[in-house]
Image (spheres, helix red, strand yellow):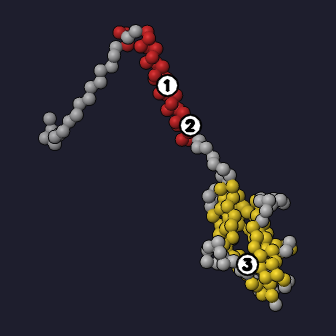
Amino acid sequence: RPEFALFEVIFTVALPQWAGMSNLDKGLSVGLVVAIVAALGCLGYVIANPKQGEKFTEFYILGLEGKAENYPQQVTVGEEARVILGIVNHEYQPLSYRVEIKINGVKNKELRTGILAHEEKWEKEVGFTPEEVGVKQKVEFWLYKDDALQPHLEQPLHLYVDVKL
């Protein structure tokens, strides 16, 4: 024995002799081996093919401080008001998005995200410019997937602004 071998563990496993087993024991042993192999196969399949969760797109507006507050409320006609617009792709496939900003139903601006991978986030400071004086003008943010003609959501995100001279 070499001098550096200070610790040694010897394992011995006594397997029953196949010839000495009853037919019932042989059948149960084979069944147990088949069940273990099947369970390992199922485990491998589940690991290789995880279940997809719900498919959806996060779409939100934040104030300039990055919080869901302090949105523009008073705006001067012809001057740009700004918010942070965010989109997160949870659709399990790469997608591009388009956002139309409308004021009182009239298109004011269009933005494109480029292609977002699954779980990728696009967040950008964006502006809109009211062209008419008025109280409680509705600013809508419509989300479209790729180049779809119909909006991705039934209702837009929106806020109201008072526009003065």
Q: Position of residue 61 (x, y in %)?
A: 69, 70
Q: Position of residue 51 (x, y in %)?
A: 61, 44
Q: Which residue is mark 3?
A: 127
Which residue is at a point 66% across and 59% down the rendered structure image?
Answer: 89
Seen from the viewer's position, the closer of residues 31 and 165 is 165
Decide: marks 3, 1 in contact (CB < 8 A)?
no
Checking the image for residue 35, the label placed there is 1
Seen from the viewer's position, the closer of residues 51 and 69 is 69
Residue lying furthest bottom: 165
Q: Nearer the viewer, mark 2 or mark 1?
A: 1
Q: Quadrant of the C terminus?
A: bottom right
Q: Position of residue 45 (x, y in %)?
A: 56, 37
- Three-letter residue code for mark 3: Gly
- Three-letter residue code for mark 2: Tyr
Q: Secondary structure at mark 1?
A: helix
Residue lying furthest front: 135
Checking the image for residue 45, the label placed there is 2
Disc 3 to disc 2, how far (Cα)? Answer: 48 Å
Does the rendering let one see residue 102? yes
Q: Residues within 10 Å of mark 1 (few under 14, many from 20)?
A: few
Residue 145 to residue 77: above or below? above
